[in-house]
Image (spheres, rainbow, N blue to C red):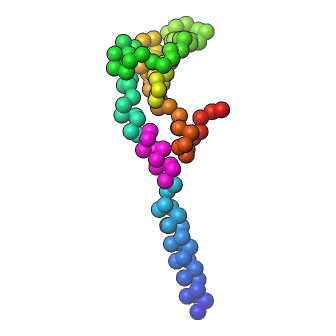
Amino acid sequence: MKAQSHTLAMALALATGLLLQASPASADILLVERVRAESGALPARGQTMAQIEAAYGAPVRKHAPVAGPNSRKHNPPITRWDYAGFSVYFEYDHVVDAVAAKSQPEEIGPKPIQ
């Protein structure tokens, strides 16, 4: 009898663990799906500033270039352009990265910095 109750308890614990793992948070899925969808529309690495402006129009904001104190070779100027849904980072005049904007206020997930 003791072995049966131990086996039943183990089976219940295992089933509960599997059920908890099988039900991911739906808010996380929505955030991941939004970022995946937006990533396909982001500028590609290596494109020029002229290509980005031709494809996406004028940015909402152009930030001044920032460079480190040492030689330009080791600390090149980095410029950021902000668009409505993403930001583009340039080294000199070529894209090095494009990043989707932070989550919307009604979206559950990482919140914008206050």
Residue 10 placement: quadrant:
bottom right
Expressed as whole percent of the image width and height from the top left, the position of residue 91 reads 46, 15
Residue at coordinates 49% horizontally, 61% vertically from top-left? 23
The residue range painted magenta reads: 26-35
Q: Residue furthest bottom?
A: 1
| Left-right relation of 2 to 37 | right
Residue nearer the viewer, 2 or 95: 95
Q: Main secondary structure of the magenta part?
A: helix
Q: Residue furthest front?
A: 106
Residue 28 in magenta?
yes
Expressed as whole percent of the image width and height from the top left, the position of residue 59 reads 45, 18
Residue nearer the viewer, 46 or 83: 83
Q: Is residue 74 above or below residue 110?
A: above
Quadrant of the drawing holding the N terminus: bottom right
- Residue 89 visible in the picture: no
Residue 49 in magenta?
no
Quadrant of the drawing holding the C terminus: top right
Residue at coordinates 58% horizontally, 86% vertically from top-left? 5
- Residue 54 visible in the picture: yes
Expressed as whole percent of the image width and height from the top left, the position of residue 90 reads 46, 17
